[in-house]
Structure formats: structure tokens, C-alpha cells
Image: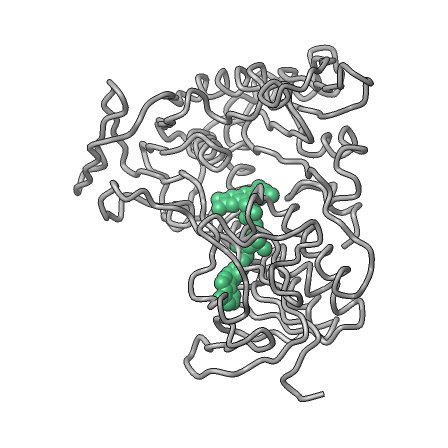
Amino acid sequence: MDNSKYNVAVIGGGPGGYAAAVRAAELGKRTVLVEADALGGECLNRGCIPTKAMLAASGLYRRMLGAADLGIVADNVRFDYGAVLRNRSAIVSRLNSGIRQVLAARKIDVAQGRASFASPNELAVVGNAGGSRSIGFEYAVIATGSASVRPAFLPESPRIVDSAGFLALESIPESLIVLGGGAIGCEFATLAAQFGSAVTIVEQADAILPDIDDDARALLLESFASLGVKVLTGATLSDVEADADGVYGAAGDAEVYGDILLIATGRRPRIDGLCLKAAGIVADNAGITVDAQCRTSAVNIFAVGDVTRESPRLANWATMQGLVATETIAGNQASCAKHVASCVFTNPEIAVAGLTETMAGRTGIAVRAAKRSFAWNGRALAEGAERGFVKQVFAKDGGHLLGVEIAGPHASELIVQASAGICGDAPPPHPTLSESIYSL
Ligand code: FAD
């Protein structure tokens, strides 16, 4: 074989591409992973992990402020934001070097640079330090992820940032406008408010987190209220101006102000510059179309993760697709589960697998729900976290389990057991301790 020809070339080293490359090598394929930036992708470097490190730190700070409720005296509780950031960086570096070691142990070549298709069997990779090389492949897996969307009406200002920009801030803003009440917006609102920031969420839709049920949302809204988070729903942000003192705007009838405005209005697939046409791949602004085995319109090229159409934009979905793509390449039977569990790491955490009552109602499926409160659960009481519930959603017709929703302590871990049978053997939510049981 020509030295630069691989059985499998993977573009992108996030949870989708990393899983694909590892499984391809384990299945005996000569594999190369091309990454333009840091290994681990958006997930490790600017997404799942850094946000959870900061949610853990700010959550602990909040808990210590209320420690007297558990009989603990904690005087003069403060935080050192610089130290929080250093701890976060250390976690990211450690996991990054872990990925590097796993790739090396499986003899996966890593090509640092930006890939584009030169033909259906060849990539052109432009190195970060200039220079380019060509990589031939039998099969390719596109796992280039997604980028945040910046609404055109927002002015350019260092005070108006996306999630990556927020994570790069050296101090916690005294006040914050969060534009968008989806999972990312709600998690940032939680972490900033837990650190004492005065947060206003502006959401155009009638509700934040529209796919969850009202009772789960009510718990989150109660928690937001106790943190002083203002939630403006059915409100369109307009007339935004930013100057040296802050960001100002209107949200419906209300005036809003923040030291920083965080954009959390969604993400778009990262397909620009890939020259998909040169490989015969059909895609549009919504992403690359794939089938249940992650095949694109080009027979030897697969796509996984956030870059694919209709992706729920979750790391565990990307990982599942990466594994399915490479099993398929190796000629094995594999197919994506219909659902993976999704979690919002707010306080309380909210985890969903399969259908909620809300989703079932929207699609006209008749369901029956069984709900159990944590108010009589000893563990929840012991932790001072009895607000919450587990709700199972069954088909009215047939009685089989269609979904589970959990709001409360450790929801992201509990959902794994509760959702067996809905998510098949799909990877558990990320990041969770439950991942240590699931083997890649
Ligand atoms: P990515 O992780 O985005 O990786 C894509 C990689 O491809 C990147 O490293 C990029 O540099 C590289 N790349 C792109 N183009 C090229 C090219 N042409 N050549 C070479 N390399 C290229 N999901 C969860 O499940 N749980 C969470 O708690 C969670 N929290 C999140 C918090 C935030 C703030 C954000 C933004 C996202 C979060 N997500 C979370 C979503 C999760 O990060 C994504 O679903 C996941 O990273 C998608 O994985 P991926 O492999 O498709 O792409």
C-alpha cells in the first residue's frame, strides 16, 4: 500500500471522529485522524467538559453558601475565578493527553491540519504551520462538528460572545444577558448565576427548553428564581447596542442590560471549506444527509455527529454514530439507536430518554405517565435535594415504555438505568460517571 493511503481517514477529533478512529483501528484498519485544532473537539475543549467543570465549581460554591441547612458551618466562603479556570484547563489537558495516548496505542496516525476533499478517495490537508499533504483513503468519516450561529442583528463587540468566548473570559461578569433558552443557554445561566452574576435569559419561544414537560421546567424556573435569574420568554431581543460600559437592548417590553451578552441561539454544521462536491457528497445548510449506518451520498464516505442533518447535537450521539460508521465500514451489522439520553446539567439536572409527555402530545401519541417524587427518597433527603421526580411515559395502547424524564439530583446518571430498552446499547449521556461502565 502507498504510504499515504489509509483504509480509513477520519476528519475531526471530537467524540464522533475519535470514536470512529479508535474503533476502525481496533477492527484492523490503517487509520489516520485529521484535526485542525485540539484533539477532543468542541466537546472537550469548549463544550461539555469545561462547562461541567465550571458548573461543578459554581454549584459547590452555592452549596457551601447554604451548608448551614445540612448543619455545616462554612464562614467567609469565596471563590477565586482564576483558580477555577486553571483547574478547568488542567482537566482539559489531562483528557487531551489521554486521547493522544489512546490514539498512539492503537497506532492511529494524527495529521494536524485542515482537511478538504480533493476527490472521492483523496484529502488535501493544509498544515497549521503552512504546507500541505495529500492523504489517500478507501473510506472516510466526516466528523467536523458544528459552530455557533451568530444572529446578524448583533453588533460586533468584545462584550458579545458565544460559548467559547464566554469560557475565555477572565472574570465572571457582574451581569449577563443570555440570548437563547436552550440547553447551552440554561447551563451558562446556571453557572454564571451560581457564581453570583445577575442573569437575564431572553427566549423568543414561549418556553425555555421546549421539549421537556412543564413540571420539570417549573422546578428549573423555581431554581432560577432562587438564583435571581430573570427569564423573559416570548420575547424577541432587539435594538442591541454595546459600548465600553455594557450591552443594552430591548426584549419585548422590557429593557435588558448586561456586562456581557452570551449568544446561545443554536449551532450550524461545519461543512465550509470541506469541498464536499469534489467527493460527490450532498449537503445543505442543515448538514450532511446520512442513513442509519451514517452513509452519505458517496458510497465510501460516512458522516457522524453534529455535522449531520437532524443530529441532536450531543456527544453521545456523535460517539454512537462514529462506532456505527466504522462497524459498517468493516462489513459488520450496525445501526444507530433511535434515541440517546439527553441531559441539561442545570440545577436540578434534567435528563430525558425517548419521549416526554410534551413530545408525545405534539406527535399525537396517546400516553400514560407514572411519576414518582424524590420527596420520599432517603438519598435525596440526605443530600438536601428532594425536589425532583422520575417520570415514565408508557404507550396507552400496549403499555410499553416510550420515554423517561428525570428532574433532580444525579438525573444524568439515573437516566442510564431508567432508559434501558429505549436507547438500546447507545452510549450513556456525556459527561457522566456511567460512561466508565460503558466500554468504547
Ligand atoms: P466536535 O466535537 O465539534 O469536533 C469536531 C472537530 O473537527 C473539531 O475539533 C474541529 O477542529 C475539527 N474540524 C472541523 N473541520 C475540520 C477540517 N476541515 N479538518 C480537520 N479538522 C476539522 N453535548 C453533550 O452530550 N453533553 C454536554 O454536556 C454538552 N455540552 C455542551 C456545551 C457547549 C458549550 C457546547 C458548545 C456543546 C455542548 N455539547 C454537549 C455538544 C457537544 O459538544 C457536541 O455534540 C459534540 O462535540 C459533537 O461532536 P463531533 O465529534 O460531531 O464534533
Q: Can residue 249 be seen in this view?
A: yes
Which residue sits at x=72%, y=41%?
Answer: 428
Residue 79 appears left or right of 150: right
- Kindly identify the residue that appears in the image at 43 percent across and 66 percent down: 273
Coloring basis for residues: one colour
Looking at the picture, does residue 214 appear above or below residue 127?
A: above
Q: Which residue lies furthest to the bottom in this view?
A: 2
Residue 80 placement (x, y as % from top left): 43, 42
Residue closer to the observer: 359 or 404: 359
Q: Which residue is drawn at 55% across and 48% down?
A: 309
**Where residue 102 sits in the image (x, y, percent)?**
71, 66
Residue situated in front as seen by the camera: 7 or 264: 7
Please give left or right for residue 337 compared with residue 275 in the image.
right
Q: In which quarter of the image is residue 414?
A: top right
Residue 125 in the figure: left or right of residue 370: left
Q: Quadrant of the C terminus?
A: bottom right
* Residue 331 coordinates in the image, percent (x, y): 81, 64
**Residue 139: x and y, percent?**
67, 70
Residue 48 visible to an observer of this rendering: no
Q: In this view, does 200 lie above or below 416?
A: above
Q: In which quarter of the image is the N terminus?
A: bottom right
The answer to whether 333 is drawn above or below residue 261 in the figure is below
* Number of numbered discs visible in the structure rendering: 0
* Residue in the image at 51% along x and 32% along y: 61
Residue furthest to the top = 376
